[in-house]
Image: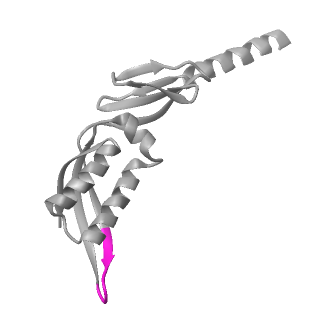
């Protein structure tokens, strides 16, 4: 095969690869946090296919902003016995920017704070729940309901 044709095919392949890598699909109920030149640029909320300028813009994280329920299970050790604690909580991510930039894994960090507060306080009275909610809000998470089993 002619070297010019091979060069053209290689260039077409590289260009199509760059274009395909620059397309991102956003599902309904999710938002996408975008950085330009490594700095927060914007949040995309509209579902669909979005194009980013290669090497200048990138999607940092796609965040589910629908109401979600999780169960936090851990063992609280006491003097001679241990008990398994199950806490169900319903939440919604209300501030995607804070959620992405508050911690590498904001949900895991929040759950660790939740566990530590539970172990320290040993109950979920309104004051403790207010403390936990305040920490969650600072991470972009809105607590809707919390129940201990």
Position in image of residue 44 (x %, y %): 38, 24
Q: Residue at x 32, y 74 (%)?
A: 75
Q: Would you place residue 106 above or below residue 46 in this image?
A: below
Q: Residue at x 79, y 15 (%)?
A: 6
Look at the image and give the residue range highlighted in magenta: 74-81
Where the C terminus falls, by quadrant? bottom left
Where the N terminus falls, by quadrant? top right
Query: How many numbered dots are placed on residues in this image?
Result: 0
Position in image of residue 5 (x %, y %): 78, 10
Q: Would you place residue 103 above or below residue 73 in this image?
A: above
Q: Would you place residue 90 above or below residue 10 in this image?
A: below
Q: Would you place residue 17 above or below residue 97 in this image?
A: above
Q: Residue at x 20, y 57 (%)?
A: 129
Position in image of residue 19 (x %, y %): 58, 18
Residue 103 seen in the current view? yes
Lateral position of residue 95 relative to residue 62, left or right:
left
Residue 2 seen in the current view? no
Position in image of residue 83 (x %, y %): 27, 78
């Amino acid at each position: 095969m002619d070297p010019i044709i091979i060069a053209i095919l290689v260039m077409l392949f590289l260009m199509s690869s760059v274009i395909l890598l620059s397309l991102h699909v956003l599902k309904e109920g999710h938002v996408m946090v975008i950085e330009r030149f490594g700095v927060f640029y914007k949040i995309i909320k509209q579902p669909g296919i979005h194009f980013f300028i290669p090497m200048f813009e990138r999607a940092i994280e796609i965040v589910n902003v629908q109401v979600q329920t999780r169960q936090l299970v851990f063992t609280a050790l006491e003097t001679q016995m241990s008990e398994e604690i199950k806490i169900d909580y319903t939440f919604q991510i209300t501030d995607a920017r804070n959620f992405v930039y508050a911690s590498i894994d904001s949900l895991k960090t929040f759950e660790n704070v939740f566990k530590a507060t539970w172990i320290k306080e040993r109950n979920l009275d309104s004051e403790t729940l207010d403390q936990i909610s305040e920490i969650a809000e600072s991470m972009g998470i809105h607590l809707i309901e919390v129940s201990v089993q």
